[in-house]
Image (spheres, rainbow, N blue to C red):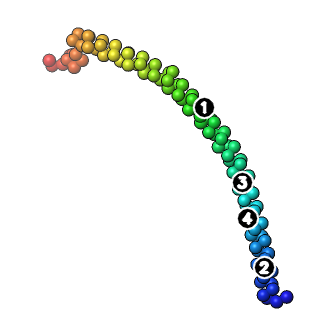
Amino acid sequence: MSLAELRDLFIVIFAILGIGATIFLSIIAFIIFRKIRDMLNSGRATLESLHAIATVVSEDIAKPLGSIASVFQGVAKAVEIITGPFRRKEGRKGGRG
């Protein structure tokens, strides 16, 4: 066997190995893609349910609590305005005044 024939034999062997490796990696990539796709779909469903929960909490709890808090703040401000002139001054006790 001459050097040229040996070179051609190695080229053919490496070409066959390259094609086999390409096919193998393609199959592995496809299997990984299918598994990841299932996980991503599951994650997407979880995020959608979390979004629904956050929406319910926002609409049914946060908005009413905000309204109640604003009413209490308004009442507190009204009481402050009404009792303002009758409030004792803190800075004038026991000094030189």
Quarter of the picture holding the C terminus: top left
Quarter of the picture holding the N terminus: bottom right
Left or right of residue 56, residue 80 in this image: left
Note whether residue 80 is visible. yes
Q: Earlier in the sequence, mark 1 or mark 4?
A: 4
Classify 10 Å Cα crowding around label 4: few (below 14), some (14-19), many (20 and above). Answer: few
Question: Where is residue 53, by image quadrant?
Answer: top right
Q: Are marks 3 and 2 in contact (CB under 8 Å)?
A: no
Question: Where is residue 86, by image quadrant?
Answer: top left
Q: What mark, if any, has residue 97 been given in the picture?
A: none
Note whether residue 87 is visible. no
Residue 70 percent location from the top left of the image: 38, 19
Q: Are marks 4 and 3 in contact (CB under 8 Å)?
A: no
- Amino acid type shown at disc 4: Thr
Residue behind mark 4: 22
Relative to the observer, which residue lies in front, 68 or 43?
43
Q: What mark, if any, has residue 49 been given in the picture?
A: 1
Q: CA distance from mark 2 to mark 4?
A: 18 Å
Q: What mark, if any, has residue 30 been given in the picture?
A: 3
The residue lying furthest to the right in this view is 1
Residue 41 percent location from the top left of the image: 65, 41
Q: Are marks 1 and 2 in contact (CB under 8 Å)?
A: no
Residue behind mark 2: 10
Q: Earlier in the sequence, mark 1 or mark 2?
A: 2
Residue 62 percent location from the top left of the image: 47, 23
Report the number of discs.
4
